[in-house]
């Protein structure tokens, strides 16, 4: 089952985790040391982000290292760019029609 990345990004702690991972790969402990939440809470947030396709994990010894999942992040970016292009096109159309009426 694949989660919705926008639902996953609706939580400020998960957005903070995504921002941290945007700066580089990190373990649960490294993330928890940066945020005002516990390691178990970080693990739960990471599971949701992983289900949403935004992060991947890699076992390294006894730790799991998390990083952003390029495909998931690119899918969100493409969606937002599409929505923005459509909104900009509608705005341009309205602006041109308003200008002509004056």
Image (spheres, helix red, strand yellow):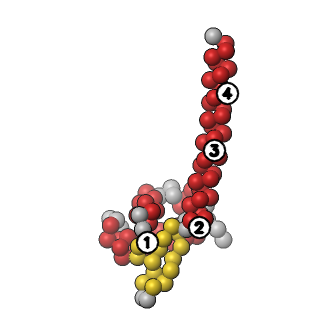
Q: Earlier in the sequence, mark 4 or mark 1?
A: 1
What residue does disc 4 label? 93
* Disc sitting over residue 83 in the figure: 3
Q: x, y percentage for residue 49?
A: 53, 67
CB within 8 Å, label 1 to label 2? no
> Please, is residue 90 above or below residue 16 in the view?
above
Q: Earlier in the sequence, mark 1 or mark 2?
A: 1
> Please, is residue 39 above or below residue 62 in the view?
above
Q: x, y percentage for residue 91?
A: 62, 30
Query: Residue drawn at (51%, 58%), measured in percent from left and top?
Result: 9
Tell me the SS state at disc 1. Answer: loop
CB within 8 Å, label 4 to label 3? no
How many other residues sit within 10 Å of disc 4, few (<14), some (14-19) or many (≥20)?
A: few
Q: How many marks?
A: 4
How many angstroms separate mark 3 from mark 2 (CA)?
A: 20 Å
Q: Earlier in the sequence, mark 4 or mark 3?
A: 3
> Please, is residue 34 above or below residue 12 in the view?
below
What residue does disc 1 label? 25
Name the foreground residue: 86 vs 28.
Answer: 86
């Amino acid at each position: 089952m694949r989660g919705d990345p926008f639902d996953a990004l609706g939580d400020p702690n998960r957005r903070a985790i995504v921002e941290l991972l945007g700066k580089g790969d990190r373990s649960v402990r490294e993330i928890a040391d940066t945020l005002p939440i516990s390691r178990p809470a970080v693990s739960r947030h990471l599971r949701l982000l992983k289900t949403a396709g935004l992060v991947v994990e890699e076992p390294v010894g006894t730790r799991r290292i998390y990083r952003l999942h390029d495909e998931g992040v690119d899918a969100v970016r493409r969606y937002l760019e599409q929505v923005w292009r459509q909104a900009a096109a509608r705005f341009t159309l309205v602006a041109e029609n308003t200008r002509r009426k004056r």
